[in-house]
Image (cartoon, grey):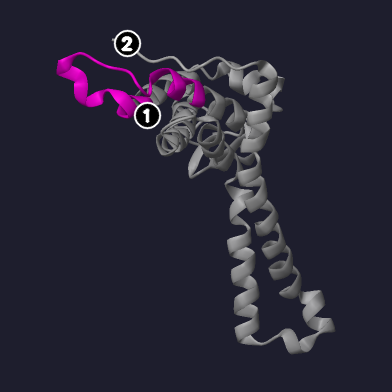
Amino acid sequence: MTAKTAPKITLWEFFQQLGKTFMLPVALLSFCGIMLGIGSSLSSHDVLTLLPWLDMPLLQAIFIWMSKVGSFAFSFLPVMFCIAIPLGLARENKGVAAFAGFVGYAVMNLAVNFWLTAKGILPTTDAAILKANNIQNIIGIPSIDTGILGAVIAGIIVWLLHERFHNIRLPDALAFFGGTRFVPIVTTVVLGWLGWRSRWCGQSSLWGSTPSGR
């Protein structure tokens, strides 16, 4: 079983490339922020009181639509970063890297959800427990909110896995799972393990979260 190793880059070059990957989600965030701002302000009660001619069903439908669509980037910003980082850093097979980014982020949060359930913290609707353990709905999964930093670290891990394994050759019996198909597979295992070993994730101030229940 062999894999082709990518040329090494300096730390400075890595951070330069990493910074460039942020531009894709940041650009969308800026555009969505404009849509959200316009839609929210022009559908607010105060503006409608001041400018009653805006209170037309068609105009209000457009403004509310802008608010809803504009909120997308703010609701899903972490997963956007986790996809954009391997997409931007990968030298080859960028689509596979981006796909693995989403897989890794989703699997990591599912594994964290498993850990929270195993510890008896979930399921619960108690707001105090959810707040104490920094639990949020992450892409529809109740999980510890690691924020942008968690997504960036997960994205970097996915990129490293992609660069290491996207050209891997497996024995003939397992050849179907080789090459680019192996990237989301190994991502599932590694990020799943990372999420499962999430005691440090819930308790470390690195994520800006409060200690989880024991």
Q: Which residue is drawn at 71% across and 74% down?
A: 43
Disc 1 secondary structure class: helix
Is 61 above or below relative to 175?
below
Judged left or right of residue 211, residue 171 is left
Task: Give the mark nearest the N terminus, 2 or 1.
Answer: 2
At 57% from the left edge and 46% from the top edge, which residue is drawn? 76
Q: Label 1 is placed on what type of residue? A: Pro
How far apart are the alpha carbons under marks 2 and 1?
17 Å
Whether 209 is among the magenta residues is no
Q: Is residue 131 visible?
A: no
Mark 2, residue position: 2
| Magenta residue span | 159-183
Answer left or right for 146 relative to 205.
Answer: left
Of all residues shown, which one is farthest toward the front? 7
Q: Can residue 145 be seen in this snapshot?
A: yes
Q: Indicate the secondary structure of the residue bearing disc 2.
A: loop
Residue denoted by label 1: 184
Q: Where is residue 212 in the image (x, y as percent from the top left)?
A: 62, 23
Q: Where is residue 172 in the image (x, y as percent from the top left)?
A: 16, 16
